Image: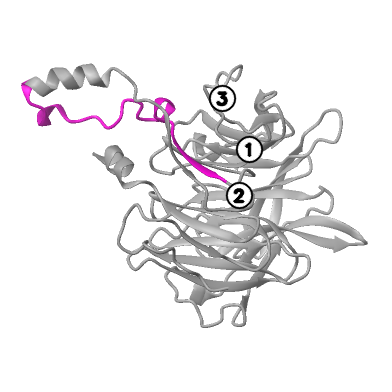
Amino acid sequence: MNFKLCAGCKNSFDCPPFSANVSDVEARALTPQTAETDAIRFLVGTQSLRYDNQIHIIDFDDENNIINKNVLLHQVGEIWHISASPADKGVLATCYNKTSDSKVVTCAAVWRMPKELESGSHESPDDSSSNAQTLELLCHLDNTAHGNMACVMWEPMGDGKRLISLADNNILLWDLQESSAKAVLSSSTALEGKGQLKFTSGRWSPHHNCTQIATASDTTVRGWDTRSMRQIYCIENTHGQLVRDLDFNPNKQYYLASCGDDCKVKFWDTRNVTEPVKTLEEHSHWVWNVRYNHSHDQLILTGSSDSRVILSNMVSISSEPFGHMVDDDDLSDQEDHHQEEKSKEPLQDSIIATYEEHEDSVYAVEWSSADPWLFASLSYDGRLVINRVPRALKYHILL
């Protein structure tokens, strides 16, 4: 399907969103191309039982306000999760369904896209679906003995050679070898307890030399040390219902965000997990995604089954709770006293904007890796919407 720009986008910074139906089938998997920091690029995975599934490479040209799309065939099954290597533009991992011995199982694999499509800013072919290229399979993350894959996480600051997969109640740490053509299981651990415990999501912390991850299972969030594969903290009853997603504050090493089916978003200090530091209750249905802005951690994105995307300004628990501090040398004597009084009070948290361009459940929201002021959201009907942080807030943060 061709992309169509919203009317009036061309000349206004706070323009209506750029939106398009990525495909004619359902989709729930979205990731920025993490290693691409020069061009704005997102990857979308489709979820169809009737057709061959695809990965859509979405390039956004912000100078000319144009969206371009290229298509890669993902013929092994419907895509439930997608993540991009932090070090290699051409490498990505997917979790997907396949039928084996009359049973549906969820597997994971590492892929490479064609060399000519690794970097951003490609023009769309005349008919992207008929010109679709094929992904190169690098290796499977063999889960035969461990169960269904929920997600794959890359080591955030690494060389793209270490990743973790969550399979049922197992945490599996993999080393990629031989140019990522072989995945070796280096360590693992299992979640033990009553009932059928299964991980729903996880996140690898960029702090502590990348030695910690957080996982969600049912209503509980746990922290793990990847060196010993032992639990280091546990947040019981994190949410009243299933925990859907997690994200670490990129600038504050102990801060973690969670969201779930109780319609809430909660912020935690993992050193003291008895109560959340803050709670947001702005959504009216399950919250599927929460994402910190990579550069300005007061900016929080959430997406929900209520079809809305909410951008929040959680400045009171950010790394700059008093806002941008002005250099004393730049102040006159009169301004100095006023600035001193003003800086003693933390800025107020607020909802910046509620975006209602989607007509179906929003399963994924992601910030661009190349532009900290731009983000994308994906709903189940295959609609991708690209938005910018409002200009007034951007300049308030910067100035």
Disc 1 secondary structure class:
loop
Label annotation for residue 362: 2
Q: Could you give the CA–CA distance between mark 3 and mark 2, rounded to whole angstroms?
A: 28 Å
Q: Is residue 218 magenta?
A: no
Q: Is 238 situated above or below 65?
A: above
Depth check, front residue: 122 or 252: 122
Q: Could you give the CA–CA distance between mark 3 and mark 1, rounded to whole angstroms?
A: 16 Å
Residue topped by disc 3: 270
Quadrant containing the N terminus is: bottom right
Residue type marked 2: Val
**Residue located 44% across and 43% down the image:** 293
Lower position in the chain sequence, tag 3 or tag 1: 1
Q: Are marks 2 and 1 in contact (CB under 8 Å)?
A: no
- Of circles 3 and 2, which is in front? 2
Left or right of 328 in this view: 276: right
Q: Would residue 82 be visible to someone looking at this image? A: no
Residue topped by disc 1: 226
Q: Is 13 situated above or below 245?
A: below
Label annotation for residue 166: none
Residue type marked 3: Thr
Depth check, front residue: 80 or 384: 384
Tell me residue 131's x, y (percent).
59, 82
Q: Is residue 332 magenta?
A: yes
Read off the magenta span: 308-333
